[in-house]
Each structure stands twice: as structure tokens, then as C-alpha cells.
Amino acid sequence: MPKQNPSKVQPLSVREFFARFSSDDACLEHVMEVRYGLRHPCAKCLNLATFHKLSNRPAYSCAHCGHHVYPCAGTIFQDSRTPLQVWFYAIYLFVTTRHGVSGKELQRQLGVTYKTAWRMGQQIRKLMGDAHGFELLKGHVEMDEAYVGGRRSGGKRGRGAPGKTIVFGMRERGGRTITEVVPNVKLNTLREVALRTVEKGSTVSTDELLSYGLLNGDGYVHGSVQHGAKEWTHYDYRQDVTHHTNSIESFWKLFKTSVRSTHIHVSEKYMQRYLDEFTFRSDNRQMSNAMFDLLIAVV
């Protein structure tokens, strides 16, 4: 199937969202349809059965034996006092926004307490991380580390600056992105992440950080650019490949802008969840209905 142009894929409008999910029952039916199907083999009688909504509880009943299926069981919706339609609208906001949604914005949009809004946001970010999944990066991969944190007047900037969270990113050119919070940028730390994330034999582009020298002896085709010497691209005639880290650096620039403009500050404790959210959004730029259904499928 040909890949759709992200610029031509339109997300649900707010009007379309509320027309499609007009009530909690409509949302529950969607969860049932995405997770199980309104017609599927019954776990009890094993017949291919149609399931019908029960009027007095959030469950569906098998037309053959009456076995009950609770679509929200084992999900973030289970035992939640927040209406299902409110949960759906929160997920919709995360899917359609570019820079994320703050807890205060969720509080205003959903009409819930800040504590509830914050908890919902964290659970949706976890969903995005689960939906993104894991697959080894291969082909041509760019690697770069970044330092995320609040401003410190008069302090050191860049590598080694205090009060910063260190994040490490790997981006497959034309493909997926994987990001991770790391304790430092020492050789052994970056080597461990690279070995379990990037397929051996891949071409890897980095900057001149000495820790990236680990790649030369680990089965990767490694090339670097000397940012300190104002070199942003480097063509290697022996490998017939252009090395640069522009793609992963662009990712970090957008991520930092998102943190500054939307969240103001993100603590190291929760940084991975915000990385997972932004990585999921970056790798699924279509912002289509399929993204919404993908999150519902992993709840």
C-alpha cells in the first residue's frame, strides 16, 4: 500500500470527533470494536458470535451463551470515575496537537481537577510509548545526545552543564526514532544503548564526541562530522555516503521547543514518558484516525 503524504492526511475535526463519539456508549462500542470486534469467537462457548451491549453495565454479551465481555477491563479506563468520552477527548488532543498538551491545558479543556488531568496525561504518554513499540534501527542511522533542562544563569552551557537531563537519540534516515534518558555520555553507556538498538552492519553518523569511537569496533560503518570545526556535513568517498546529524538534531530542537513552550519544565523522573510521546508523534506525522485507533488498541 502506498504511503500517504502526511500533509494530505486530515485529522478528525472537533465537530467530527463529537459526532463520532457522542456518548460514553459510543466510546465503549469503539473500544469493544478495536480490541475484540463486535463479532468474534466467544472465549466461553467458542462460537463465532455477535456481541450486544448490556443496558445496565459497561459490558457486551455473547448472543449464543450470554458470556460477558468488559472492553475496558485491564485498561487505563478500568475503575476510572472519569467518563469515557472525556478520556477519548484527552487522547484526541494528544493525537492532534504538535507540541503536546500540558496538565493545565487538559484541566481547562476537560473540566477536571489538575490532579486528574496530570494523571491522565501521564497514562496517555505511557500508551504512546507502548504503541510505538520497538524494532531495531538499520540502514543509515544518526546518533546524537542532548541536554534538556531549565536555564541556569552564569552556569556552564552544553555538555557537562549542571541540572540537565541527558537524553540520547537514534534516528533512522527516512524511518523510526528511538530516544532514551541516559545517566552520562561515557563510552560504555552509549555502547550499551547502541548495541541493543541499532542493527550490526548499519551505517552510523555522529558528531565528534570521543565516546562514539566505540562504533568502529562493533560492526558499524561509522562516520562523523566535526561540529567544533564548523563542519555540518561530510562526504566519505570510501563509503560513498554523506554523514551528518541534521535529522536527529532537528528532532531535539523540536522537542526542546515543545518542552519550553508547552510544559516549561520536565523533571528527569518523567522525562522518558515525554520522550516517548514526542517520538510517537514524530514517527506518526499523519495524525490520522489510525493513530487514534492505535492508542485505543493498546489501552
Image (cartoon, grey):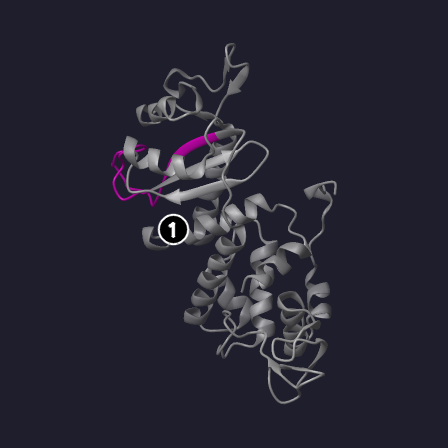
Please tell me which residue is depicted at 29% across the width and 30% down the height of the picture: 187
Residue 88 horizontal side relative to residue 259, left or right:
right
Q: Position of residue 165 (x, y in %)?
A: 32, 44
Q: Which residues are magenta?
A: 142-165
Q: Where, by quadrant of the figure, is residue 230 drawn?
A: top left
Q: Is residue 147 magenta?
A: yes
Q: Quadrant of the N terminus?
A: top right
Tag 1 secondary structure:
helix
Residue type at numbered disc 1: Met
Q: Is residue 73 magenta?
A: no
Please tell me which residue is depicted at 64% across the width and 69% down the height of the picture: 36
Residue marked by disc 1: 271
Q: Position of residue 154 (x, y in %)?
A: 25, 36
Q: Where, by quadrant of the figure, is residue 61 drawn?
A: bottom right
Q: Position of residue 212 (x, y in %)?
A: 35, 26
Query: Can the viewer see residue 197 in this picture?
Result: yes
Q: Residue farthest to the top?
A: 237
In the image, 78 versus 11, the foreground residue is 78
Residue 163 horizontal side relative to residue 294, left or right:
left
Please tell me which residue is depicted at 34% across the width and 45% down the height of the picture: 149
In the image, 32 versus 180, the foreground residue is 32
Residue count near mark 1 (Cα–Cα under 10 Å), binned few <14, some 14–19, many ≥20: some
Q: Where, by quadrant of the figure, is residue 35 drawn?
A: bottom right
